[in-house]
Amino acid sequence: MAVLKLEIQPDGSRMRRIYDLKLDRSNMPLVSLLWLVAHKIDEQSPLWGMTLEDMRRDGVVLFLTLTGIDATSSQSVHSRHIYTPDEILMNHGFVDVVHEDGRRRWVEMDDFHKTRLLT
């Protein structure tokens, strides 16, 4: 995962820079249910202290590229998505989509993209 930001240089010129984002977990050897790709925004993050307005002003976009091996065909699979500030929800988290009833475990796909406001 990486972020592209527009930065003002000391001479006043503008330059787009790419920063790698440190992930909480950069790989997952077995994805039996789900894997949430997450980057903690702390003092070391290039996103630290930015508001959505700052991100829009600075032309911030997040690039996510995932590569894996399909368990059935043993072929490589790839996914890429670019997120703009208009797709970012501040102070939100995903709802849990994994459910258990004591006998079985399942993923509720209807809830896959649902979020909740964090308190």
Image (tube, rainbow, N blue to C red):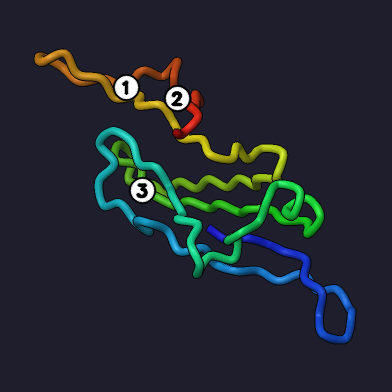
- Secondary structure at badge 2 equals loop
Check disc 3 and give the amino acid type: Ile
**Residue position marked by numbered label 1 in the rendering:** 107
| Quadrant that contains the C terminus | top left
- Secondary structure at badge 1 equals strand
Q: CA gap, disc 2 to disc 1? A: 8 Å
Q: Is residue 89 above or below residue 16?
A: above
Instruction: Spot the residue most to the left.
Output: 103
**Residue position marked by numbered label 2 in the rendering:** 112
* Foreground label between 3 and 1: 1
Label 2 environment density (alpha carbons within 10 Å; few <14, some 14–19, many ≥20): few
Locate residue 46, reporting x and y percent: 59, 66
Q: Is residue 83 above or below residue 10?
A: above
Check disc 2 and give the amino acid type: Phe
**Tag 3 or tag 2, which sits nearer the N-term?**
3
Callout 2–callout 1 Cβ contact below 8 Å: yes
**Residue position marked by numbered label 3 in the rendering:** 69
Q: Residue at x 61, y 45 (%)?
A: 81
Locate residue 69, reporting x and y percent: 36, 48
**Tag 1 or tag 2, which sits nearer the N-term?**
1
Label 1 environment density (alpha carbons within 10 Å; few <14, some 14–19, many ≥20): some
Q: Is residue 16 above or below residue 65?
A: below
Locate residue 116, reporting x and y percent: 48, 27
